[in-house]
C-alpha cells in the first residue's frame, strides 16, 4: 500500500539535498549558450563562467549550440541529467517560443527551472536616414496612407524584436510588415541602405548609428527612458498605451535538479552580478544587471509565457 512520506523521510530528503549542495560542484559545469559566439547571451556566459571557476575551482565550459531561435540549446539543457551540472542561457525568446512554435521539444515551465535573471536590456525603434518620420505619432499618420508599405526589420522570426513589432501593430494600431534578418547587424545595415523603413534593435546595437546620424530613434520600448538615451521618449510617452517591453536574459537548468543546488547556483550568479567591474561592463553595454531569487525568476518567466501567448494568438503568427 502506498503511504504518504513521513516527516522523517522528508527531513532526510532535505538533508541529503543540502549535503549535495555543499559538495557541488565536483566536476566541470556545462554552460550552454543557444546562440553563436559574440552575441549578448554569449557575452553574459563568458563574463560569468571564469568567476564561477574562481569560486569553485571547477571549469565552467561554454558550449555554443545555436539554431532554431535558441531552442536547440534550451532543449539540450531540458533533457540533460537533473543535477545542476548543465545550465543554459535563456531569454525573452525562450518564453515566446512556448506559443510561437506549434511543435517544441521541451516546455520551459515543465522541463526547465529558473536559476537566476542575468540582466535586462531596453530596445529602441529606429528609422533610416531617408525617412522623414521622427515620432510614433508621425509614423502612425504615414502608415495610414501606406498600407502594407511600412516595413520593420528584426533579427528573425519569433525573436523578441519580432514580438515588439507585433505588439506595436496591436497596441498602436499601426500597419507594419515584418522583414526577418539573420541578426540585428544585417537589419541595421539594410535600414541605413534604405531597404527597410524601421528596425527594432537592442539599444546597445543602435547607439553607435544614432550618434553618427545614420539612424533616428523614435522611441524606446522600456517603461522608462533609458539612461544612455535620455532624450528618446518611451512608447508609452509616445501615445502607445501599456507598451512595456524589456528584453531579459537568464539561466535555467533541468527541472528536477535539487533545489539546494539551484539555490547555490543562484547565489553565485547573483554575487557575480553585484561585482562593481561586472556591473560597469554590463552597464556600458546597455544592460542592467538584475539579480533576483529563484522563485521570483520562475514567476517572471511564467508571466512572460502568458503575455506573449496572447500577443501571438491575437496576431495569428504561430509557426509549425
Image: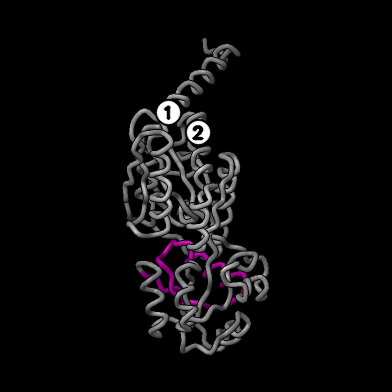
Q: Which residue is at a point 41% across and 82% down the rendered structure image?
A: 192
Q: Which residue is at a point 38% across and 34% down the rendered structure image?
A: 85
The answer to whether residue 307 is above or below residue 10 is below
Q: Position of residue 89 (x, y in %)?
A: 43, 48
Residue that mark 1 sits on: 24
Q: How is the image coloured?
A: one colour
- Span colored in magenta: 152-181
Q: Position of residue 116 (x, y in %)?
A: 52, 43
- Decide whether residue 160 is among the magenta residues: yes
Residue that mark 2 sits on: 264
Q: Disc 2, disc 1: CB below 8 Å?
A: yes
Q: Position of residue 68 (x, y in %)?
A: 35, 56
Numbered disc total: 2
Could you say whether the residue bearing mark 2 is in a helix, strand or loop? Answer: helix
- Decide whether residue 39 is among the magenta residues: no
Q: Nearer the viewer, residue 41 or 288?
A: 288
Amino acid at each position: 500500500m502506498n503511504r504518504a512520506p513521513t516527516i522523517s523521510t522528508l527531513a532526510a530528503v532535505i538533508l541529503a539535498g543540502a549535503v549535495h549542495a555543499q559538495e557541488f560542484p565536483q566536476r566541470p559545469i556545462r554552460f550552454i549558450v543557444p546562440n553563436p559566439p559574440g552575441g549578448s547571451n554569449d557575452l553574459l556566459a563568458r563574463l560569468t563562467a571564469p568567476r564561477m571557476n574562481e569560486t569553485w575551482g571547477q571549469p565552467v565550459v561554454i558550449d555554443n549550440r545555436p539554431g532554431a531561435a535558441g531552442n536547440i540549446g534550451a532543449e539540450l539543457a531540458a533533457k540533460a541529467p537533473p543535477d545542476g551540472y548543465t545550465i543554459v542561457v535563456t531569454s525573452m525568446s525562450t518564453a515566446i517560443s512556448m506559443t510561437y512554435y506549434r511543435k517544441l521539444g521541451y516546455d520551459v515551465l515543465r522541463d526547465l527551472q529558473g536559476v537566476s535573471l542575468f540582466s535586462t536590456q531596453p530596445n529602441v525603434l529606429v528609422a533610416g536616414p531617408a525617412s522623414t518620420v521622427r515620432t510614433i505619432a508621425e509614423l502612425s499618420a504615414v502608415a495610414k496612407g501606406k498600407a502594407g508599405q511600412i516595413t520593420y526589420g528584426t533579427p528573425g522570426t519569433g525573436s523578441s524584436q519580432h514580438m515588439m513589432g507585433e505588439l506595436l501593430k496591436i497596441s498602436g494600431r499601426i500597419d507594419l510588415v515584418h522583414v526577418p534578418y539573420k541578426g540585428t547587424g544585417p537589419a541595421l545595415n539594410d535600414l541605413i541602405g534604405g531597404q527597410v523603413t524601421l528596425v527594432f534593435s537592442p539599444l546597445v546595437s543602435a547607439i553607435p548609428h544614432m550618434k553618427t546620424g545614420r539612424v533616428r530613434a523614435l522611441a524606446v520600448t522600456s517603461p522608462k527612458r533609458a539612461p544612455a538615451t535620455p532624450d528618446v521618449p518611451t512608447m508609452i510617452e509616445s501615445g502607445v498605451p501599456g507598451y512595456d517591453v524589456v528584453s531579459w536574459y537568464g539561466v535555467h537548468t533541468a527541472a528536477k535538479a535539487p533545489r539546494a543546488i539551484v539555490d547555490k547556483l543562484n547565489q553565485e550568479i547573483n554575487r557575480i552580478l553585484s561585482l562593481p567591474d561586472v556591473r560597469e561592463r554590463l552597464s556600458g553595454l546597455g544592460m542592467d544587471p538584475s539579480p533576483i531569487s529563484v522563485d521570483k525568476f520562475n514567476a517572471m518567466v511564467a508571466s512572460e509565457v502568458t503575455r506573449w501567448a496572447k500577443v501571438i494568438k491575437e496576431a495569428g503568427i504561430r509557426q509549425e
